[in-house]
Amino acid sequence: MLRMSNIKLKPGQPVSMLAEKAARQLREKDPGIKNLKIVKESIDARGRGGIQFIYTVDFEAADEKRLLEKAKRKKINLKEAPDRSYEAVISGFEGRSDYNGERPVIIGFGPCGMFAALILAEAGLKPIVLEQGRPVEQRSRDVERFWETGELDEMSNVQFGEGGAGTFSDGKLTTGIKDKRIGKVNDEFIEAGASETIAYKHMPHIGTDVLKVVVKNIREKVMRLGGEVRFGSEVTGLEWENGAVKSVKLADGSVLETSHLVLAIGNSSRKTFEAIYRDGIEIEAKPFSVGVRIEHPQSLINYSQYGEANDSEGRLSAAVYKLSYHCKDDGRGVYTFCMCPGGTVVGAASEKECEVTNGMSVFARDGENANSALLVSVSPEDCQRETGDHSPLAGMIFQRALERSAYEAGGGGYRAPAETVGEFLGRGPAEPAVKATYRPGVRHTDLRECLPAFVTEAMEEALPEMARRLKGFDLDGALMTAVETRSSSPIRILRGKDMQSVSLSGLYPGGEGAGYAGGIMSSAVDGIKIAERIIADLAAEEK
């Protein structure tokens, strides 16, 4: 296979022209291109020539050696396609079905736990997954009831349940990591029902509506391969002997023995954070971010990004953005995160009388509003100063305090405090330019009632500066809804190069909640890495 990049198409040109465009760049009338596959697609809106789609493609050709030699002489952007295929390291097992040894146990069925379970099941190791929440079908009903009535189920909500918090966002797969396991994750998602475009889109997403089907199908695959998924299984503690995991204790009083335990919890697993800290498992405070959700008319974002581009083929999806800024005095970071084009702002609480926001989009991204988290970086020192607590849990305590303040500022009932950008920046009263999408509902109020000064001051400075890069970002009528606190984990469970806790042999902390990932893709990849390590450890024990 050969790889060619920087192939350009205008919005009115179909992807079926890619082979013809590649031949032109090769300066060949008919190079015998076949089996062309899109590797990457991005949109360039910066050039004077208007909007262009930029592609990287892999293909086979009649005489690849000759074309590579010609490309080198003529400085054509062509090279051999790298091998990004992935095969799980299952030496000693090879997916056998006769395994009767000790079964690995996984706590949590978000992306990390899901892919750890899948790889272990493919190796024939029959993992057992313990998920305190409910299957996605029931979970969806519980979440909808909360949005409609404000009736919160602390075990089944936007944060907890099958698929993790990502199930009720946008299913974003954007990541900064480079790992061949990404291909494995994409392949499994596509097999389970996701669009094939997630493998090459610049900012790929599955969509909340599709993701609910995808996670269910992956669960069923794990079970077909011999794994077990137990919902409503709350872990209350661990048991160990001679510094090694021995078993886990469940809320129903049962005990499950294992010496290979994957801790794939989410970043909202506060009971678990408190429990492992009490048990002396080494953790540390880590930086995270807090802020608000900001909503604009999607039409404004489209115009700011695309102008008046002609899109007769309908290939320009709702525009996205990603902005960042560093404050002048202290360098504190302010940035947008988890941008949901055509999406909604949703209630994401998981604790009583604590109000939390998140963003969500369906696959079509066809809603009237665009929303994104507008976040300010928070250091462990900030949390210690704000809470007076100097333990590794200070960040969690700080988050909870903000969420309770937001609940009170919203007037109770899980309504969220909201304010227009014009009012927040002191420009005077402003009519909202959007209809608030947050459910259960909003109460217009001063956001300084629930956010500390260092956060609001950073946002005040950043908003006009961000508008220099994205026209209209500081629109007076844009709506800010508080409070966003769950962008990442406030703690890290320390582990060594063997992926095991530095405090307890056989405990494999991983994913977002443990502090080792920052989204669906990186969490899934971390789960695969942990599974590979467990497979290698069990294979060594059998020899």
Image (tube, rainbow, N blue to C red):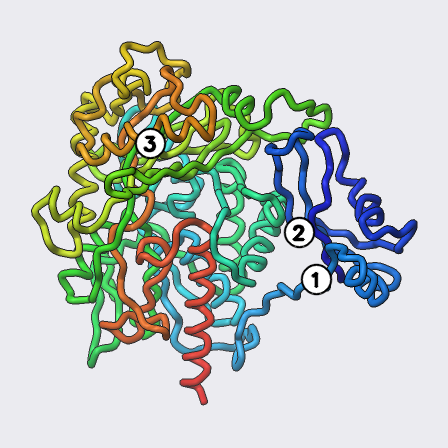
Q: In the displayed orientation, state which residue is furthest to the right.
A: 29
Q: In the displayed orientation, state which residue is furthest to the left.
A: 388
Q: Nearer the viewer, residue 495 or 362?
A: 495
Question: Residue drawn 21% across and 60% down?
Answer: 284
Disc with the residue nearer the chain's start (2 vs 1): 2
Question: Is disc 2 in contact with disc 1, using a CB cutoff of under 8 Å?
Answer: yes
* Residue 258 screen position, x and y as percent: 32, 72
Question: Residue drawn 47% across and 20% down?
Answer: 297
Quarter of the picture holding the N terminus: bottom right
Disc number lying in front (1 or 3) = 3
For residue 402, above or below residue 505: above
Q: Tag 3: Cα neighbours inside 10 Å, few (<14), some, or many (≥20)? A: many
* Residue 35 screen position, x and y as percent: 79, 54
Q: Label 2 to label 3, Cα distance in Å?
A: 35 Å
Residue type at mark 1 is Ala
Identify the image quadrant of residue 403: top left
Residue type at mark 2 is Val
* Residue 417 screen position, x and y as percent: 25, 23
Q: Label 1 to label 3, Cα distance in Å?
A: 42 Å
- Residue on which disc 2 sits: 39
Residue type at mark 3 is Ala
* Residue 168 screen position, x and y as percent: 42, 38
Q: Tag 2: Cα neighbours inside 10 Å, few (<14), some, or many (≥20)? A: some
Disc with the residue nearer the chain's start (1 vs 3): 1
- Residue on which disc 1 sits: 81
